[in-house]
Amino acid sequence: MITELYLLNYSFKYQQDITIEEIEKKIESLFEDYDFIKEHDDKILKHNSIYDEVIYPDLMLWEFLYDKNKGKNFSRDIKKFLLKIIDHSESTHRTVEEIIQRLDKHHEATIYGLLCLHEVKSIEEKYLVYNRHNWFAFHRYFLGQYPISENHFYHECQKYFPQLFFHDRVEETLKGLEKGLHDFSKIIVHHLTLLNDEFCEYYNQSNRIGSLNKFSSACQVDASPQGNAKDKPNMTFEFMNDSNVKEPVCCEPHLKLGKSDDSGNSHYYFNRIYFHEGKEKIANGRILIAHIGKHIQFD
């Protein structure tokens, strides 16, 4: 899948009453994540009308970047940051109107978004990327829309959920989902997002059940431990630890995926995400995802 992110004049237009300090903070945030985004092979393109946009009263962007006598109230480093973002991005020959129209023409081969300094109120939020946080949200959304295959979904999850570590068996367990991945991709992405972004807020190492209950209540998910101790061997999987030794880990906590992405489908499915809250010497303490698929069968 190809990702094209565009730098347009709209998102660099001066916002009423915004301060120099606020603009500098936004530029620095965008700069800090620019290289990260490019390292993940997203294509960043600029429309040259961006240079003529007014970034601050009586100050066009090209003046901000290249005229030493203008914009002197801004930090020199901040100017360098924005210069790198814009000048290191390839120009596009598409018109601004064509770019905006392309946003809704995404498909499984190519997706489109805007790399922004400021919010563009006329564009849906799902297409706007301001920093790394939004970049993750952008790609998670489209992963739910276009899972493509179990192989693709498994490998993309490793990019967009940095607090989670996926056992290599997950690619295979995805193939066992009741009704299939394409009918559960959105709900899986939703649950993985909550695990990645929210779970640590509710986790208490000394009270697993209480933690899962709080997480379930706050995030409106169904998270629980396995009720029968004799079933634990079936939920134990080997993960490589920091000593390069395979270590057995019981991944009994699980999220129940009872409903498919089709809101009109009332059927209850026995799909699960089995995980462990994380161990200090495995995968830098990340949450361990051992299984995304049909309910594990017990002896």
Image (spheres, grey):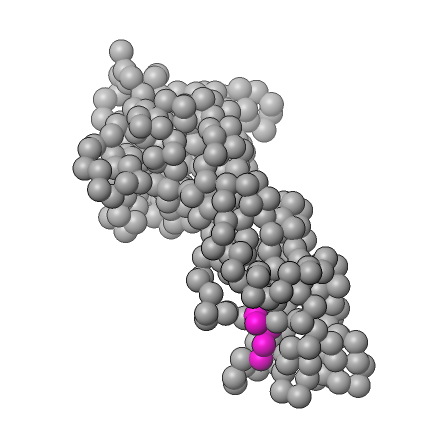
Quadrant showing the C terminus: top left
**For the view shown, which residue lies furthest in the top direction?**
299
Q: In front here: 97 or 46?
A: 97
Picture coordinates of residue 104, whole percent (x, y): 47, 55
- For the point 58% across and 76% down, the residue is 13
* Res 176 → quadrant: top left
Residue 266, compared with residue 63, is above or below; it is above
Does the image show residue 213? Answer: no
* Res 70 → quadrant: bottom right
Quadrant showing the N terminus: top right
Q: Main secondary structure of the magenta part?
A: helix
Does the image show residue 60? Answer: yes
- For the point 64% across and 60% down, the residue is 94
**For the view shown, which residue lies furthest in the bottom direction?**
58
Q: In front here: 3 or 195?
A: 3
| Number of marks | 0
- Span highlighted in magenta in the image: 10-14
Picture coordinates of residue 189, whole percent (x, y): 40, 42
Picture coordinates of residue 91, whole percent (x, y): 71, 60
- For the point 29% across and 17% down, the residue is 297
Q: Is residue 116 magenta?
A: no
**For the view shown, which residue lies furthest in the left direction?**
266
Residue 23, compared with residue 275, is above or below; it is below
- For the point 34% across and 48% down, the residue is 202
Q: Is residue 284 left or right of residue 275?
A: right
